Amino acid sequence: MPVLVASDLDRTLIYSAAALALTMPDARAPRLLCVEVHESRPLSYMTETAAQLLTDLGDAAVFVPTTTRTRKQYQRINLPGPEPTYAICANGGHLMVDGVSDPDWHAQVTARLADQCAPLAEVQEHLLRAADPVWVRKHRVADDLFAYLVVERELLDEDWVKELAVWAENRGWTVSLQGRKIYAVPKPLTKSAAMREIARRIGADLTLAAGDSLLDTDLLLAADRGWRPGHGELADTGFTAPSLRVLPDRGVLAGERILREFLGAVRGAGAVPGLGA
């Protein structure tokens, strides 16, 4: 039976220059591979060792990139290894199959959102009205599903974020602060629902997941086994669960460690004949 590995990308497997956390002496820093270019500039990285581990993982399991990024943002990423058949974009709003969004899945998601939470327009209007132009740099809507702000983190009033979270909670939405972005996402829009659908389609016997942010909570709880790094929203709040392994690693080396853990779990499950335990 196949093993499904659904992993968050940003600050879980891939890292911007600002998030690398290269705290070791320069001479001992790992060799890095650029996996994303945006506007002709390198943007995201993983270690070369992580790249090989991901290639091995793609050969041994069904690897599913799982991200809050829009489809367009996801398609900028050039991950090593076999091209994934499935990917989850827009926090579960799009289930990608061979690079194309499954229209039936997207229709199910949009119907669920219309039925279970306040409309995007209401949330977008609140963000435009309530956010302080002193620290907001951009207002964005992602795939007509959720909204986010790009902010100057050092100027941000984090009490405002807490107040926004309370406001959103009462309307069936959740708020997540990740780096320079504040996300407002409908609660019914989840990575876990899309992961379960892929697991159903492929007949997965085991599901593995990793993530670092509040928006990964449902994914980690839905998987048979999960991992989180020593950085990010979930680390800051001390989130844990019986099926979750908390790693001490931070930054780009955490991505490498997560892939090593994935591969060990897949091999231990005997997903591919001859891999052994």
Image (cartoon, rainbow, N blue to C red):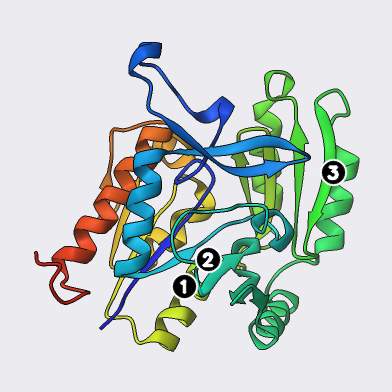
Q: In this rendering, does residue 197 appear at all?
A: yes
> Pointer 3: what residue?
139
> Pointer 1: what residue?
195
Residue 153, by quadrant, is top right
- Where in the figure is residue 220, as x and y percent of width and height? 38, 59
Q: Residue 191 — which label?
A: 2
- Where in the figure is residue 232, as x and y percent of width and height? 47, 36
Q: In this rendering, does residue 131 appear at all?
A: no
* Residue at the (85%, 48%) spot, across then down: 126
Above/below status of 84 relative to 97: above
Dot 2 lies on which element? helix
Q: Do labels 1 and 3 touch, CB within 8 Å?
A: no
* Residue at the (54%, 45%) spot, across then down: 10
Marks 2 and 3, how far apart at CA: 23 Å
Above/below status of 99 relative to 124: below
Dot 1 lies on which element? helix
Marks 1 and 2, how far apart at CA: 6 Å
The kind of residue on which mark 1 rests is: Met
Q: Is residue 241 left or right of residue 67?
A: left
Above/below status of 50 relative to 87: above
Q: Residue 73 — which label?
A: none
Q: Is residue 264 left or right of residue 29?
A: left
Q: Is residue 194 left or right of residue 155?
A: left
Which of 46 and 223 lies nearest the eye of the viewer? 46
Q: Do labels 1 and 2 touch, CB within 8 Å?
A: yes
- N-term-proximal mark, 1 vs 3: 3
The kind of residue on which mark 2 rests is: Lys
Q: Which quadrant does the C terminus fall into?
A: bottom left
